[in-house]
Image (cartoon, coloured by chain):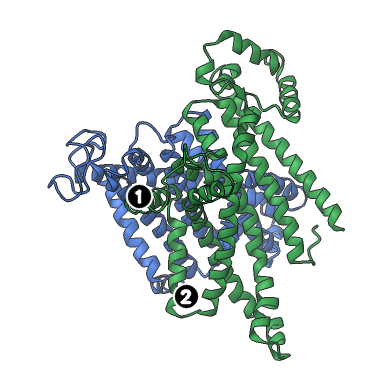
Amino acid sequence: MNKLGFLARRLQQGATMLLVIAVINFILIRMAPGDPAMVMAGEAGAGDEQFLQQLRERFDLDRPLPAQLGSYIGHLLRGDLGISYRQQAPVLDLILERLPATLLLTGSAFVLSLASGVAIGVWASSKVGTWKDSAVSFLATLFYATPLYWLALLAVLVFALWLPWFPPLGYQSVGMGYSGMAHVLDVAHHLVLPTLVLAMFYMAIYARMTRAAMLEVAGQDFVKTARAKGLTPGRVLRAHVLRNALMPVVTMAGLQAGAMVGGAVLIETVFAWPGIGRLLFEALAQRDYSLLLGTFLFTAALAVIFNIVTDLVYTLVDPRIEMP
Amino acid sequence: MNSGFLRRFRRNYGAVAGVFVLLLVGCGALAAPWLCSHDPWALVQLPFVPPGTHADLLLGSDALGRDVASGLLYGARVSVLIGLVATTMALLLGVGLGAVAGYYGGWVDTLLMRFTELFQAIPGFAFAIVLVAIFQPSVQSIVCAIALVSWPPVARLVRGEFLSLREREFVAAAQLSGLSSIRIIFTHILPNAVPPIVVMGSMMVASSILLESALSFLGLGDPELMSWGYMVGAARTALRQAWWVAVFPGLAIMLTVLSLNLVGEGLADGLNTRIDGRMR
């Protein structure tokens, strides 16, 4: 199968996945205690009979369940994720407004964690059996066990409160009216702590995996062959060992990229970072179920998209793979 | 075999240290009412008493004057309880589905694995948040939510084990002697698949505890129970005045989770099994 066919297949799988998640969302609204219209309206909107009636008509809540589901999916396909009574705005608008901040945070954390994790893993595998290797393994195990939100609080405590190097929260300095380069630098300054904390946990995973994969691949016959035919150690490492060792890491990274959006809920909450994760927390705090479920659906969609992107990268790393 | 297990397990110092920490956490959880005289919710002192300055408050007091040490001990109960119960549920689900998929193969396998992949593609943490929020926070809803987002890796692991084990001769022998499929699955194949399941189980208790603490941190804990995540969450607003209120419960979570992971690695050494890192 060629790459295009592969892409089409993955897109179709992704679409099915989103459909099922939408159905789960629908079921959750119905399973929640109370009238679905009240659940969708949230605590704040439940007293507004006119708004409830409007919701019932909009989502056909007076009709049988299959019709309700059809109506719900129809609305989703038209990009209608419902309305947040609390914020008096369509859910999708609220999410799209927060999307850039989340993409910026998760994107930089993803790149940082993957690059540094792989580099550290390769380094540790070249020092296997020494104290340096043990130190890397220990630190990786430690960070893997550290609650993200707690690490975030420690980072704020040490690097924002005790040592005022970085701002403790927010996306940009309020009231400074920066523009151009100054604005970019200001946002970057705010981005440092959240990115580092979010990246730390994933870096630990990638470092451990890379180290294990490097050691495993290095013991295989084709590596001996490459050495025997006189390639330089650096070339063997890069072109033969690393390239093969990267594959399980890339797979993992694809799966984790989706999870990272979930981890961002905690980080964005601690750092008051105006992203989708923070939006989900606000929805939670205000019992705004329309917004909560819409955000969840959107997060799942992002995860599916990240997975597809990784699969495409995967075919670049390993041309043998043209997928079943 | 048993002595071999202990010998290999003992050689892993991290795992041995982990066992000691877990024993400590377990004892603290069990003996909480005897170890501290006051309820974790009780306002026993002035707010923000730093640790070590008051004879009765080893770890200081929080923003409301509650005893941090008492919170840690009672919080251990919640973590241990939820970690164990949620993992048991996830294992039951995962082992059941994985065993059926791996043993029968064919379209049953395809169907069940599609289902598993689907669940695995949903961002687990966000899903758990939504589940607990919709069904209202309680021990039951938290346990169910954690189990629901944690079972897919178990199903995939067990399926893999079953796929290879079912080709073995002892299974063919059991089939020829006319045993039922259920019997073969439970008494012949499953016992052989136990080592990797045990290893994964110990690491899942760790991830369940992390997940529970994160939910509690966001305010989705059982409102009746003092938990470590709740303590860290409540400490957020007064971080500058009282670092200890946030630091100690977080340390407790980290040490417990770290110990469980180390014990999991020790078990893997002892049982001579390797779980692929990517399964987690």
Q: Is B176 drawn above or below residue B11 in the view shown?
A: above
Chain drawn blue in the picture: B
Tell me where residue B36 sits by quadrant. top left
Cβ atoms at labels 1 and 2 below 8 Å apart: no
| Pointer 1 and pointer 2 on the same chain | yes
Q: Which image quadrant: the C terminus of chain B?
A: bottom right
Residue A7 place in picture, x, y as percent: 81, 51
Residue B154 place in picture, x, y as percent: 58, 52
Q: Is A123 drawn above or below residue B61 in the view shown?
A: below
Mark 2 Cα within 10 Å, few/some/many (few <14, many 20+)? Answer: some
Residue found at the far top of this picture: A50
Classify residue A192 as left or right of residue B112: left
B203 or A59, nearer to the observer: A59
Residue visible at 43% across and 71% down?
A135
Residue A298: mark: none
Query: What residue did someone put label 2 on?
Result: A133
A288 or A165, nearer to the observer: A165
Query: Helix or strand or loop: what does disc 2 sit on?
Result: helix
User: Would you say residue B155 is visible in this rendering?
Assistant: no
